[in-house]
Image (cartoon, rainbow, N blue to C red):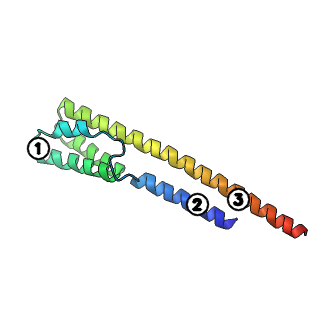
Amino acid sequence: MIKRLVIALSALVGISFLVINGCSKNEGGIDTSRVQAAFQTNDSGTQHTNVQKALAQIRSGDYSGALASLQKAAATLKLTPEQKSAIDDLVSQIKTKTAEALKSASKSAGDAINNAGKGASQTVDKIQDQLKK
């Protein structure tokens, strides 16, 4: 009973870690082409630094870091309307992706806890049956 509860809690912690840190090693369905195109011809080095950092973070699955880098770029730089729109779209995609991952992780964690509860009930039933003998 306790073993199953520990397993369920470990699964919950592991899933939470993956959601927070990102579990994908690629762009995971996030389209970065608009941002790449919008910043391709710009001469500002600082602009490229934060945007390139965000793109690298997306590729590595660090979505929270990418959001911070994009927000820093948007707050500190003079953006063209095309660049602002591209950043806003990318931020929206990242938020959607993290929300989907969190929803999936929550469902998986709930399933793990339910399974642990069922296993605990079965264990209690077996112990009660053995005590009756």
Q: Is residue 33 shown left or right of residue 116?
A: left
Q: How far apart are marks 2 and 1 (CA)?
A: 48 Å
Q: Which of marks 2 and 1 is in front?
A: 2
Identify which residue is drawn at 51% across, 49% down: 105
Foreground of the two, 70 or 115 = 115
The quadrant holding residue 51 is: top left
Residue 42 sits in which quadrant? Answer: top left
Mark before the other along the chain sequence, 1 or 3: 1
Identify the residue at image location x=81%, y=61%.
Answer: 125
Q: Is residue 109 left or right of residue 131?
A: left
User: Residue 23's spot in the image, x, y percent?
Assistant: 41, 53
Q: What element carries label 1?
A: loop
The numbered mark, 3 or 2, whose residue comes first in the sequence reads 2
Earlier in the chain: of badge 2 and badge 1, it is 2
Q: What residue type is labelled 3?
A: Gly
Left/right of residue 6 with respect to residue 93 in the rendered view: right
Residue on which the image places disc 1: 44
Vertical position of residue 37 compared to residue 128: above or below: above
Query: Which residue is pictured at 35% across the width and 51% down the height?
Result: 61
Q: Distance between the residues labelled 3 and 2?
A: 14 Å
Q: Residue at x 23, y 38 (%)?
A: 35
Badge 1 amino acid: Ser
Identify the residue under disc 3. 119
Which residue is most to the top? 81
Q: Residue 9 carries which label?
A: 2
Front: mark 3 or 2? 3
Q: What element carries label 3?
A: helix
Question: Can you tell which mark lies on residue 68?
Answer: none
Image coordinates for residue 3, horizontal then vertical, percent: 65, 67
Q: Is residue 83 left or right of residue 92?
A: left
Q: How far apart are marks 1 and 3 (CA)?
A: 60 Å
